[in-house]
Amino acid sequence: MIEKDFSSISVNDWMTTHSETAVVVSVTATMEDIAQVLLENNSRDAYVVDNNIVVGHLGFANVTNHLLTEHRPTHTHRQLFSRVTEPTAAEVMDSRFAYARCDESLCEVIHRQLERDVETLVVLAENGSLLGAIELRDLLAESLK
């Protein structure tokens, strides 16, 4: 078991030495556009932005589920509808997503990332604008030092 103590480190402190940028897409982005951005950035998480405010999250599995739905033997109503119309990020995103604030401890953030299975967790200002991101791989690498 790794015994690194992250409880005394704040998100703000972590971001000063481990600044990351989240993958962001517009609310009007298509599933194909989002898939391309995720693949180009080798990311499992994309955050949906409207007027510089983060309004939702899209995971890689959700995007591929929409794009490859025709290969499934059964379909939900949403999947059938997406075959007729091309959904946008705003229509598919999860508007209830995990995020961090600067004053939280890193220990709280790690718990949230593991609980929600999110590799990249955005750090938001009080107004919802994007300040940065915390990568689970960076936390793991630091814990192994």
Image (tube, rainbow, N blue to C red):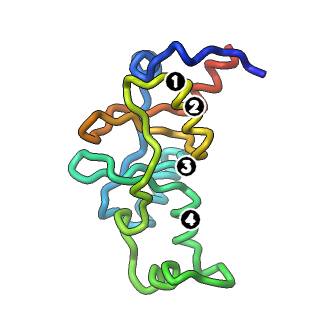
In the image, what residue type sits under mark 3? Arg
Nearer to us in this view, 109 or 39: 109
Q: Which residue is mark 2?
A: 110
Residue 90 is situated, as x and y percent measured from the top left of the image, at 34, 64
Quadrant occupied by the N terminus? top right
Which-is-in-front pick, marks 3 and 2? 2
Going from the N terminus, do you reach mark 4 or mark 2 first? 4
Q: Secondary structure at mark 2?
A: helix
Q: Secondary structure at mark 4?
A: helix
Q: Secondary structure at mark 3?
A: loop
**For the residues marked 3 and 1, what is the alpha-carbon distance in whole angstroms?**
21 Å
Q: Which residue is mark 4?
A: 64
Residue 117 is situated, as x and y percent measured from the top left of the image, at 60, 46
Which-is-in-front pick, marks 3 and 1? 1
Q: Which residue is mark 1?
A: 106
> Residue, x 38% and y 67% (percent of image)?
30
Q: Which mark is residue 44?
A: 3
Question: Image check: 52 left or right of 40?
Answer: left
In the image, what residue type sits under mark 2? Ile
In the image, what residue type sits under mark 1? Leu
